[in-house]
Image: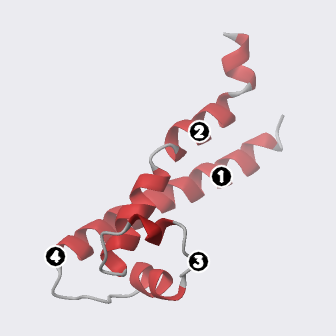
Amino acid sequence: MDFIKKNIWLILFVLWGLPLSYYRSKFRKIVYQTDSWLINIKPLFINEIKGLFGTLYPKNKVYIKFRNFYLFYLLVYLLLFLAYVFFDKKN
């Protein structure tokens, strides 16, 4: 139990971050309109950022739904990090 208390932030980051590569891959495949696995290793970021904070395909319901989910997921990740920064200062 003492291990969990000392490493709770690491555990939370690992658990929340496990599906990140899957979600990012799925989002990039939608944005770049490909099914190739190579999209995961290519450093293409411009359209990805535009697709995340804008609307590349306004009529594509799958894109809109997944973009909103992915934004929520990343927002929770950011809030988790900010909570770590805030609460770690107290310890």
Q: Nearer the viewer, residue 8 or 44?
A: 44
User: Residue 22: image x %, image y %?
Assistant: 41, 53
On the rendered structure, is 72 left or right of 61?
right
- Which label is found at residue 81? 1
Image quadrant where residue 54 sits: bottom left
Residue type, mark 3 in image: Pro
Around disc 3, counting alpha carbons within 10 Å, would you say few (fewer than 14), some (14 to 19), or many (20 or more)? few
Residue drawn at (52%, 36%), measured in percent from left and top?
Answer: 15
Residue type, mark 1 in image: Phe
Q: Which residue is mark 2?
A: 14
Residue drawn at (52%, 88%), measured in percent from left and top?
Answer: 46
Cβ–Cβ under 8 Å for marks 2 and 4: no
Residue type, mark 4 in image: Lys
Disc 1 from disc 3: Cα separation: 24 Å
N-terminal of the two: label 2 or label 1? 2
N-terminal of the two: label 3 or label 4? 3
Q: Which residue is mark 4?
A: 61
Q: Which residue is mark 3?
A: 43
Cβ–Cβ under 8 Å for marks 2 and 1: no
Disc 2 from disc 1: Cα separation: 12 Å
